[in-house]
Image (cartoon, rainbow, N blue to C red):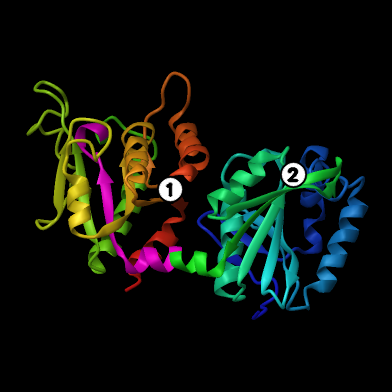
Amino acid sequence: MEHKGTVSLTTNRLLLRRFNMNDTEAMYDNWASDPEVTRYLMWQPHSSRDETKRILGLWLNHYGENTFYQWAICFQSKPEEPIGSISIVRQDELAASVHIGYCIGRKWWHQGITTEALAAVIRFSFEELRANRVESRHDPRNPNSGKVMAKCGMNYEATIRQSDWNCQGICDTVLYGLLAEEYFSTTDGQATESMALLVVDMQKALLEAQPYDADQVIQRIQALLTAARANHKEVIFIRHTEQVGGVLAEGSEGWQIDSRLEPLANERIFDKLYNSAFYQTGLKQYLDHGKMRTILLVGMQTEYCIDATCKSAFEQGFKVIIPEGCNTTYSNQILSAEKLIWFYNTDIWYHFAQVLPLTAVIDLLEKP
């Protein structure tokens, strides 16, 4: 492998960087002293800041080695405060394989942060280190850790009985893995095969009702449109249609696609009557004719038409990529729009699609 050492990595929200001694308090307070965080790990919660300081000192002594990988997980907006750690805990030069471990403070669970960090280290392992295999494992009593691995494209391989140990004693272990050929067949395949950017229901009446973070969502979709058009990728718009008298009645002002995302003259628009963009629209036939097997899915509403279209595309054999921050909806009586978007993007769609950082999707569009 081509070792680099612990170099800084960035994602849509995160900075993965080296630890320093100034991280002692944040590491202790945010996760290292919490028994809930370490419940299924192989080390006990730290009993004092002195213990955390000692561990940090050991890590810092190893940063001079190009085979040592230990990152602090931080928000880019607050790089001085680590909220967790991620590392390559084992490596095998002969097999060109790496094993990744991670943990994050309880305050930041269920926000897609660990998934984002793991995806970055997976990319680094394959694209920079030239690893042939990336693997990770979890205690079956901690299924959320397995969800993180699956969301990052890792494959379930086995549950090995009483083969491991952690703070709970001897335990079963669930193994996930990903091979370089699988990783590059996905990333390169998405870039080289024909793909389409599908913009769903970004219509005037729906946007005038002020869905969550609408202006920022539009800006991100504009960036995708620019990249798709510049690189000759297909752009398709989906427009919802209601009966006469509805705000989305055919031909009405509210039915029109928002002018900030206006289709070009040569771009197709499919009108639909139901949530799924595929149902009775001819979209599938059009995609099949153009040999477009990958769909980049953006628009609204997250829990209705985006969800239905995502699952329908999956059922019909399409690869679906959902760029982060590019779908939106409204709050309801039970959940805020922000929570709905988070729930679908992190807990629902990983079964059917890849949810990728916007920058990664733009990179896919820009590849020849």
| Residue with the mark numbered 2 | 139
Which residues, given as a range, are shown in magenta? 186-206
70 up-or-down from 334: above or below: below
Image quadrant occupied by the C terminus: bottom left
Q: Residue 267 in the image: x percent, y percent? A: 14, 55
- Element on which disc 2 rests: loop
- Relative placement, left or right, of 39 versus 316 is right
| Residue in view at x 88 percent, y 47 percent | 46
* Circle 2 Cα neighbour tier, 10 Å, few/some/many (<14 / 14–19 / ≥20): many
Q: Is residue 198 magenta?
A: yes
- Relative placement, left or right, of 348 versus 131 is left
Q: Is residue 80 visible?
A: no
Q: Is residue 150 visible?
A: yes
Q: Residue 127 in the image: x percent, y percent? A: 54, 73
* Circle 1 Cα neighbour tier, 10 Å, few/some/many (<14 / 14–19 / ≥20): many
User: Farthest residue in the top direction?
Assistant: 333
Mark 1: amino acid: Ala
Mark 2: amino acid: Asp
Image quadrant occupied by the N terminus: bottom right
| Residue in view at x 17 percent, y 40 percent | 281
Q: Residue 177 in the image: x percent, y percent? A: 62, 58
Q: Are marks 1 and 2 in contact (CB under 8 Å)?
A: no
Q: Residue 223 in the image: x percent, y percent? A: 32, 58
> Of 142 and 84, which appears nearest the observer?
142
| Residue with the mark numbered 1 | 353
Q: Is residue 254 magenta?
A: no
- Mark pair 1, 2: CA separation: 25 Å
